[in-house]
Image: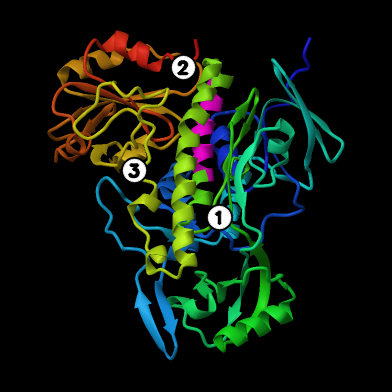
């Protein structure tokens, strides 16, 4: 007889990935513990770019208003070329649209992102267990027994390694971490104050291989200094201050955090080993170019959270296999893009500074994966596996579709009289995530259970001309487009992720 579980999920790592996962699980009623080998929360700026798709995740979790209050827009770059400073726009400033409400990257130091997510966990009643590292674990058919550095043995249903590039969880699984680390290429990263430097530019000194990005709502900059090949880093504060003055003529002071970055580009061979799963930097590590690493980790967690919740509630175990199948190709593509940008920067090419749609992560899709067959029905604009866009609509208490999606539930939209008539009779289990059903209609009036699309924008954005059911997953991706044989097609489409 196996021991009862102390918790449903044990998360190793309290950074953005582990914290996002824990928050998503807690709102599903899943029992969670979060451990971290560090003695306190991370203190540095490190990953500082929050992409548009990640902002949508934060809105769903209810913390985007905090992120916007504590962050700010990316400034223009200021290229220091001898006595001249040339402005350069790295990020195109896009206007919000009905389908993309947050089109621009947000500048937010990582320690603030962590703090926002940690406050969310506290509101859910969870306390992060600092100073508790995972030492060993054993798994069987019914769960995982983990031994912590505190001496405690924890029996859990699942173990998730979100414990960074040097992941103890990944190392214990024996899974390969394929890629390369360039020890000859090192960059100093420093948080500090710089006297006499304007805060309306991301300052760059190409000839000195140095930069200084102003961190919002503070007097600090994140300073980056690329070392020469083979040069040993010296993190003594006086040495850093002297080096920065020699390169730029400016005084750097009040240093609060330092680190040494090496290009480390690696991808784990599998995301799952039985009841042990990997997420974030434990599964993939990137160059910092393009602000992709933190965002990819948060979206790993967002993909995994609802699947763990459903399997714990009784859905087929193979739903967890779709986590790797969907996320590993995304991580591989992101690794390639960030490495390409980093190589451009190394060659002092301005193209390496430019950022566009590919980095915003809004066009990432799971189409063609195990939950979204490539030959499945589609609309004029959307396939199963695509991001479900925002759209204007009228419903009690809201005027936009993202408000309808917000929460741990599935959402089913019925367009046209045939789909609307079928909507109430579709079968959905009582266990696991709820299904929220809405008939989309034109005309006036707001009734519960209906979304009013008086302008036709919702139908236009979703590319629907006639009768259709569109099922949206809890992570905001289209699960299915159904255009006929409503009950049977719905049952087939939902079999993979609903409890039996």
- Can you give x and y, in whole percent of width and height, for residue 15 in the image? 62, 48
Q: Nearer the viewer, mark 2 or mark 3?
A: 3
Q: Work out which quarter of the rendered image holds the N terminus and state it.
A: top right
- Can you give x and y, in whole percent of width and height, for residue 147 in the image? 81, 32
Secondary structure of the residue carrying numbered label 3: loop
Q: Which residue is mark 3?
A: 363
Q: Residue at x 37, y 81 (%)?
A: 86
Cβ atoms at labels 2 and 3 below 8 Å apart: no
Cβ atoms at labels 2 and 1 below 8 Å apart: no
Would residue 59 be found to the left or right of residue 10 on screen? Answer: left
Disc 2 and disc 1: Cα gap in Å?
33 Å
181 or 257: nearer the viewer: 181
Q: How is the image coloured?
A: rainbow
Res 150 seen here: yes
Secondary structure of the residue carrying numbered label 1: helix
Q: Earlier in the sequence, mark 3 or mark 1?
A: 1
Is 302 magenta? The answer is yes
Disc 2 and disc 3: Cα gap in Å?
27 Å
Which disc number belongs to residue 498? Answer: 2
Is 227 magenta? The answer is no
Would residue 116 be found to the left or right of residue 337 on screen? Answer: right
Would residue 211 be found to the left or right of residue 362 on screen? Answer: right
Disc 3 and disc 1: Cα gap in Å?
23 Å
Q: Is most of the magenta stretch helix, strand or loop?
A: helix
Q: Which residue is mark 1?
A: 113
């Amino acid at each position: 007889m196996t021991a009862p579980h102390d918790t449903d999920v044990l998360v190793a790592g309290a950074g953005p990935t582990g914290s996002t996962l824990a928050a998503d699980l807690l709102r599903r009623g899943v029992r969670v513990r979060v451990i971290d080998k560090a003695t306190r929360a991370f203190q540095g700026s490190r990953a500082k770019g929050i992409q548009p798709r990640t902002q949508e995740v934060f809105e769903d979790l209810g913390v985007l208003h905090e992120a916007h209050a504590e962050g700010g827009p990316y400034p223009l770059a200021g290229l220091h070329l001898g006595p001249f400073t040339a402005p350069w726009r790295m990020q195109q400033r896009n206007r919000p649209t009905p389908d993309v409400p947050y089109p621009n990257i947000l500048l937010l130091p990582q320690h603030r992102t962590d703090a926002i997510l940690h406050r969310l966990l506290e509101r859910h009643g969870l306390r992060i267990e600092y100073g508790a590292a995972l030492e060993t674990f054993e798994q069987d058919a019914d769960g995982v027994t983990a031994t912590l550095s505190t001496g405690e043995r924890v029996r859990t249903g699942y173990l998730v390694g979100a414990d960074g590039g040097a992941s103890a969880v990944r190392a214990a699984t024996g899974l390969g971490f394929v890629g390369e680390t360039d020890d000859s290429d090192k960059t100093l990263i420093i948080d500090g104050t710089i006297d006499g430097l304007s805060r309306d530019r991301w300052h760059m000194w190409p000839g000195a291989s140095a930069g200084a990005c102003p961190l919002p709502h503070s007097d600090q900059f994140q300073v980056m200094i690329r070392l020469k090949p083979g040069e040993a880093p010296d993190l003594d504060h006086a040495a850093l201050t002297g080096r920065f003055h020699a390169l730029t003529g400016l005084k750097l002071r009040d240093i609060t955090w330092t680190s040494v970055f090496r290009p480390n580009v690696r991808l784990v061979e599998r995301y799952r080993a039985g009841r042990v799963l990997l997420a974030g930097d434990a599964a993939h590590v990137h160059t910092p170019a393009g602000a992709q690493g933190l965002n990819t980790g948060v979206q790993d967690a967002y993909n995994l959270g609802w699947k763990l919740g459903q399997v714990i509630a009784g859905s087929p175990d193979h739903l967890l296999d779709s986590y790797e199948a969907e996320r590993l190709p995304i991580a591989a593509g992101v690794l390639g893009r960030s490495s390409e940008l980093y190589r451009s920067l190394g060659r002092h090419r301005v193209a390496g500074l430019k950022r566009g749609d590919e980095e915003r992560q809004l066009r990432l899709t799971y189409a063609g994966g195990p939950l979204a067959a490539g030959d499945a029905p589609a609309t004029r604009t959307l396939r199963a596996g695509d991001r479900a866009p925002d759209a204007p609509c009228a419903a009690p208490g809201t005027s936009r579709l993202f408000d309808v999606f917000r929460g741990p539930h599935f959402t089913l939209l019925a367009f046209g009289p045939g789909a609307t008539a079928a909507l109430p009779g579709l079968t959905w289990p009582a266990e696991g995530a709820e299904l929220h059903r809405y008939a989309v209609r034109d005309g006036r009036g707001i009734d519960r259970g209906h979304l009013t699309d008086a302008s036709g924008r919702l139908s236009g954005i979703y590319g629907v001309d006639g009768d259709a059911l569109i099922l949206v997953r809890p992570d905001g991706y289209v699960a299915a487009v159904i255009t006929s044989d409503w009950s049977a097609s719905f049952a087939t489409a939902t079999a993979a992720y609903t409890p039996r």
